[in-house]
Image (cartoon, coloured by chain):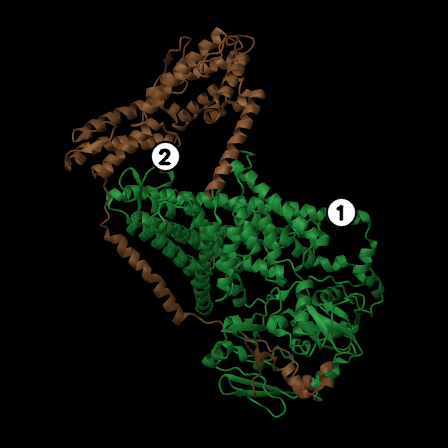
Amino acid sequence: MKSSIHSFLSVFNLLLVVTFLDGVSGTLTESSDLTSRTSLLLNSNILKQFERDYNLLFSSEKAGNSITDSVPSTNITNPCKEYLSKFSEEAATFVKCAVDKSRPFSLCISCIDSYEGARSMYDKIEQDDNTKGGCHTMLLDNDRVQVLHEINKNMKALWDNAVCDACFKSNSINVDNNGTVTYTLSQGTVQFLTLYYNTSTCIRKYLNVSEYGGFEVESVNSSVCDECRTFYKALNTHFVDMQKASSHHVCMDLVDKMNHTRLVWGSTLHCTESYKENMKIIAIGIFMLFLPVIFYVSGRFCGQRKQIKLMTQKRMSKKAREYHYGSFNEDSESEGLDSHSSEAHAVVYRGNKIILPTE
Amino acid sequence: MTKISFDNTKFLINLSDDDQLSDNRNEYDVNSTQHDSINDDSDQQEPGQSEIPDENIISGEYESLDYDLCENILYQSEEKKRSRRNLIKIEFMRWLVMFFVGVLTGFVASFIDYSVVHVSDLKFKYVRRFVDNCVENYCLEQPYLIWIGFNGILVFVGALLTVYLEPVAAGSGIPQIKCYLNGVKVPHVVRLQTIFTKVVGVICAVGGGLFVGKEGPMIHSGAVIAAGISQGKLNFFRKFDFGIFEFFRTDTEKRDFVSGGAAAGVSAAFGAPVGGVLFSLEEGASFWNQGLTWRIFFASMISTFTLNIVSSYMRDHPWDLSYPGLFNFGSFDTTTYSGIEIPIFIVMGIIGGLLGALFNHINIKLTKYRRKYITNKWTRVVEAMMVAIMTGTISYLFLYINNDCKAMRHDQEEVTSQFFCNDGEYSSTASILFNTPEESLKKLFHEKPGTYQAGTLAVYCICVFLTACWTYGLFMPSGLFIPSLLIGAGWGRLFGVMLNYMFPGQTWIDFGKYALIGAAAQLGGIVRMTISLTVIVMEATGNITFGLPIMIVLMVAKWVGDLFNEGIYDMHIHLQGIPLLGWEPEPVMSNIAAAEVMSHPVTVFRTKESVGRIVEILKHEPHNGFPVVEDYDPFIEQASGMNLILFGRCRMRIFVIALQSSEGGAETFGTFQGTILRSQLIVLLKKKAFEEYSDSQMIKRSLTVRDFREAYPRFTPIHQISITPQERNFTIDLTPFMNPAAYTVTDVASFPRIFKLFRALGLRHVPVVDKRHKVVGIVTRKDLARYKVSRHFGTMSVGEKFISSK
């Protein structure tokens, strides 16, 4: 078993080497991702050969010592390179911001600057077609992986998934030429944040706030419920209204704050009011459960039973059959006939054996 | 069992009392008399006293469809005149009708779907709002009362319609359609008021919180639509006759279209066009007809397509046709299985079969009780309402007691209720109970692991099992697919949870997958369908790789279930006494000959028959088909009929009718010439095609097949045709109108042979002739269906059923 696996692996390696070498002479983009995986398997000669070829393709400069050093740069013009570095800066800021603000969730409001910056930069690259600097073709259309496009797509997916635009007033987000982002929070968001501030300050008096936004219970006394209920209710009602108004497309920043507050309110502080001690339900329920019993029992005694009239079936009498019928009958004994026809429905089969009932 | 013997006739009628009958149910014998005095009261038994179980009585009210063509001279001359152009036109019309059947079925299905969703939404929105409010304010009985009030009122409307307007619309409709496609004319089954009751009723039933589905009623609706469109007229409003599709006014054509309509219904209900076609073939078509099947498939496809378009508009994605079907099970794209799991699936199949058999057993007991004691119209309405209220009560109490809280995810508040849970959590119990059955089913299939606790699932499963069992058979349009699937999905998911306890950390345990398998097993165990069900489930999940497990599970469930009892549809069919012919004759019947199967004294007409005799016979005999003979004098037969000796009542419950056959042998009824139908005779009487009139030749020549089709499907009853005393002495020549090429069998033909003839050709009557081609008897569907084979611990026995009069 083990040896077979070994042999399989070695064949596999060989294959990889072969494909790799094919790739070198053929399309580079196809095989470049193989480099890291297969480099250990290759002897240094092949590696050197590969580096030379790679660099020859992309630059006139003398090849460096390793692949990583040999960044092809000469055929990228300066404005495009600038776009690239600006976009990378903004995108990196956004990713950092998004990760930092993921718990407690405040991605939308905290990271809008970098998001919008990166997005506008991407837009600029896209608009920079051949009539201008031609950076669109240079940066976006030149390879299969399309790093910029993918990163932009991911950022947008994250943004849309969190329904971030709902946090801001519609059309209030603007990016000027210098990359400065201006925006206005929507009316509902502002109000929500105020209410949230009220509620959390109220609750905070009774709780420690841990680093990641979770609350740690210090001492819960029931007074917290009474004291903060009005704030909490106001917040909750406002949130529900927002949900209704936007058909459940509320910015995730707010949803998360609300969820969190609710959890604290319910699970940590035990302030949820629900009263299960309601005998009326049980009483009505049990009363209802007796209804069918009454119905069916009374049906048993009072129900009018339908009378069905049976039809007299017209059948030939056994006698007649015996005397008159069929080619069998005329030739065969009447006894055989008996079992053949009229007793047929009384024939009982038990397993394979046929037992004829005796008269 | 009491056997009473008379000198030269052995035993005739033995009707014993309750205990004895149930003991030797299979040995009773109604080998009865020769006389045909239907109106003679003393001839009839009163089963009210002797207590014959319902499944042992074939109801006389069901008749056969005339699937076989009547190839009389008129028909032949019409066929001869037919031009190529005419043939193309008819073929084109067939496709056109199928197209409209598909479109209309799609629209009706969409309408049902739309209404059900909105009515339920309205109800649950109210209830949820009250619950959320009342949890804090000590008023939890309010949402409860609102809930059961809503249920009660809706179901009241539905039951009222069903009971008073059209009782045949009750139940799923699949048994009725099955019978229709089998060749039984179930009264009112394809009428306009039936579809109205069905559609409104099913909306009320699902909206009223009963554990029912809308799929069965959709299939029935499709069938009604097909029957309606193909006729090109509305009998309900007598003036609506478009005159088109006149050629299709025969049972043959209508039945073919109905099979297309049923397929379109299935395909609209499940988004399963292939499943629909197979359903039609499995349940209905007697023999494979390539052209018809192709048209049926067309109707199915069109129906799914229409439905998709309407759904796409309803969900604000116009012309985005990726919503296949009203109810599909959601896509299980990630579900995979390994061969090792197949034994597990088999075990689930066994469970499904056992639970299915149990379901059927309980339901059939209940149905018998209902047939016996819940016979008043108003009690039926009350019962339906009561079940609706009880369903609400059970759900609410279940919610009240079981508090399964789960942390709220992202943003699902719109469809959940908090109930007793803390803020920030939702009640997962409420999420399956505050929903239409379909939505609950999808939740069971697709919710993440850990959403439902084992306890919740178990209790839910039991509740649905009992209520669904209680619900089916009420006077409400109610499908059985969804409740069966719900039960199965419940225990299937539970099964998955159990497996997870046993093998913690295994990645192959996917709750959704087991829920699906469980659902299929339960459904298979209850309805015992095979090919079409497999394909429907496959199509509804959009997953072909999962075909084999589903097939295995359905197969095992059917086998296990069949050990105990029949499928629920068949049980209900037998209970209603519908003379359904199965696929094959039972294996032990081959020693029964035609002479025993047939009805013996046959009422026949001579080729030249007097009007008076025709009128008398049509008035006094319920039969629909008569052999036409020569060399026969009916008045001698009547004289010999007087030989019947009637004994009065001996003891309370035993009637003995003995007879002495006249000359020690049975009589024959002339040389067979052909058969003629009641409907044809009535048309002839109406048109007064009497030989004695001077213009009789003219009348006869002007009569065409069209005249016979005109009155279809409701022929004037004989009593409404006025015949003067003078006309009674006239004669009619039946030769040009009878079917001269009718199928006959000889008196020694075996039961299986006749059975196959009936089943494959859709016959209605088969005259039995002797060696000299003399008519000695006639076999009808009821003569065949009255034999019943029962199996009991390795013993098989053949018994006969009774036939009730109309």
Residue B411: image tag: 2
Crowding at label 1, few (<14), some or many (≥20) Cα neighbours within 10 Å? few
**Colour of chain B in the rendered structure image:** green
- Neighbours of disc 2 within 10 Å: few (<14), some (14-19), many (20+): some
Q: Position of residue B148 (x, y in %)?
A: 36, 52
Q: Which mark is residue B645?
A: none
Q: Where's residue A209, x and y in %?
A: 20, 28
Question: At x 64% / y 74%, what residue is drawn?
Answer: B590
Q: Nearer the viewer, residue B226 or B718?
A: B226
Which picture quadrant has residue A82? top left
Chain at numbered mark 1: B
- Amino acid at the residue labelled 1: Lys
Kindly tell me whether residue B163 is visible in this rendering. Answer: no
State the mark number for residue B89.
Answer: 1
Disc 2 secondary structure class: loop
Image vertical order of residue A25 relative to residue B578, above or below: above
Q: Residue at x 61, y 82 (%)?
A: A343
Q: Is residue B51 visible?
A: yes
Count of all numbered marks drawn on residues in the image = 2
Say which of B528 and B49 sits in front: B528
Real-space Cα separation, disc 2 to disc 1, in angstroms:
58 Å
**Of label 2 and label 1, which has the lower sequence position?**
1
